[in-house]
Image (spheres, rainbow, N blue to C red):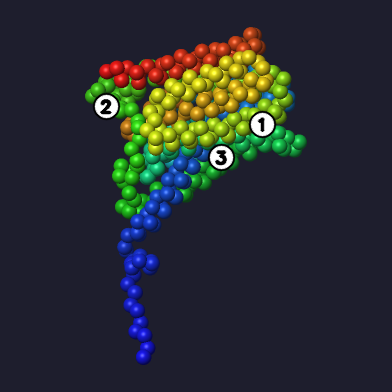
Amino acid sequence: MGTLPTVRVPGEPGLAPAPGSSPGPSAVDSSTTRTDVAVVAASGAVLAAGAIPQIITGPLGPYLRLDLGISSSELGLGLSLSSVPGVVLSVMGGRLTDRIGGITIGRLACICCCLYVVALSRAPTAAWFVAILAAAGLLRTLSEPSSSRILVDNLIRTPRVLAFGIREASLPLLVLVSTAVLPLFGDWLGWRTVFAASSIFAVAGLWLLLGPALPDRRSDTNRPAPSSTTPATAEPATATPAECPGGDVAALGLSFYGGAALVMFNLVVFNAFASLSFVDAGSSADAAATLVAASAGGAVLMRIGCAYAVTRRGLNARSTLAAMAAVAVVGYLAMATGNSALMLVGIPVGYLAGWGWTPLLYSYITVGRERSTGTITGVVSTLFAGAAIAGPVAAGWAAEQFGWATVWLITALFSALAAALMAYRQTARRLR
């Protein structure tokens, strides 16, 4: 006797969903994960693309000196001038991003970056290089607010603090890639090729924003709500507009802005001149690039690790910022000795502690402030640009006039002051 045929109903376990039915939980989870990965990757690529000229010029400084004869003061002048557009236009760029959208502005930033870094790689003289570098800040007035907006608008499940940590890791990753290739392939690759090839970050960001990172409106009803899926994070409570007449910007406090300005000053000075000061201490350009690449690799892990610790382990972002600024003092003091052996310790500590804090800062200023993310990022970018204007030109001049010891002693002092300012409000809250 034959076996009766089994009637299978569409939508049963193991079968494709019935037409018109919603996908199962596993399909939704898979789609959510893919979207979040693409969004974080796009945000990091946009951030790195806009920062390429300013971020890798310093680590490649020894090679620029060998080829173009650029001095420390000229390098500092170019980097300082490149930050001028940020002071004038960052807030405007943030407002434009809030109005138009992070994805659209991010695409524009990626296209402009590709054209810009190719032009910079063709600079024939030091004067031309400094002149082209001076306009680099225009890219960051678009890339930084749009990068933040992309995360805030499109993340579904990933905790925002962790997402910001991964995004911020794109900058030391950029340094790692750009400095690691020259010691390995310096015979047939030069700094010009590295600059031009770094546009791959912009190309990747543009591709992600044209497809994988775009929100799928058709499946919005099947997506979990961020509030129900995102684990709670140990972020400080934010003041409401009623509690703080100045709104989100004023709620952060003067001690925060003061501490942030000092650590930002140190970050740009360290990134601009760590390689050159190590070379002047007796190292070769290739050895300096290798040390910077290894240290930047550690900074990649540090940025992600800090964000993970705040998200999963309950660390307070602002208190962690204060602790890292205090640790960075040790690295800057080691740099101030001018001893190449001690600088082997100072440069990694400077990258780990002096560069690791950025995801904490950006998560601190955006969590609970979603409606004004672009604007408040623009305000902080303006502060960053102000520090970036003063830092490189002052440090480059001081290095030529008084030596590197003076530069690194000042950064150590600033880092200690930043730690005190960042810790101040946390202590005041506990006392209340």
Quadrant (top left, top right, bottom left, bottom right) of the N terminus: bottom left
**Real-space CA distance between mark 3 and mark 2, rounded to the nearest whole angstrom:** 37 Å
The residue tagged 3 is: 201
Q: What residue type is labelled 2?
A: Thr
Q: Which of marks 3 and 1 is nearer the N terminus?
A: 3
**Real-space CA distance between mark 1 and mark 2, rounded to the nearest whole angstrom:** 47 Å
Asked which quadrant contains residue 49, the reply is top right
Q: Which amino acid does label 3 sit on?
A: Phe
The residue tagged 2 is: 240
Crowd tier of the residue under label 1, counting other residues whose Cα lies within 10 Å: few below 14, some 14–19, many 20 or above: many
The residue tagged 1 is: 290
Q: What element carries label 3?
A: helix
Above or below, 74 relative to 177: above
Residue 18 relative to residue 87: left or right: left
Residue 331: where, in percent of width, then height?
56, 20
Q: Which of marks 1 and 2 is nearer the N terminus?
A: 2
Which residue lies most toward the bottom here? 1
In front here: 115 or 178? 178
Crowd tier of the residue under label 2, counting other residues whose Cα lies within 10 Å: few below 14, some 14–19, many 20 or above: some
Q: Nearer the viewer, mark 3 or mark 2?
A: 2
Q: Nearer the viewer, mark 3 or mark 1?
A: 1
Write the residue at 47% across / 49% down. 211
**Real-space CA distance between mark 3 and mark 1, rounded to the nearest whole angstrom:** 21 Å
Write the residue at 40% across / 33% down. 310
Q: Do the residues labelled 1 and 2 touch (CB within 8 Å)?
A: no
Q: Which amino acid does label 1 sit on?
A: Thr
Write the residue at 52% across / 21% down. 328
In front here: 179 or 432? 432
Quadrant (top left, top right, bottom left, bottom right) of the C terminus: top left
Q: Is mark 2 on a helix, strand or loop?
A: loop
Q: Which of marks 3 and 2 is nearer the N terminus?
A: 3
Residue 355 relative to residue 375: left or right: right
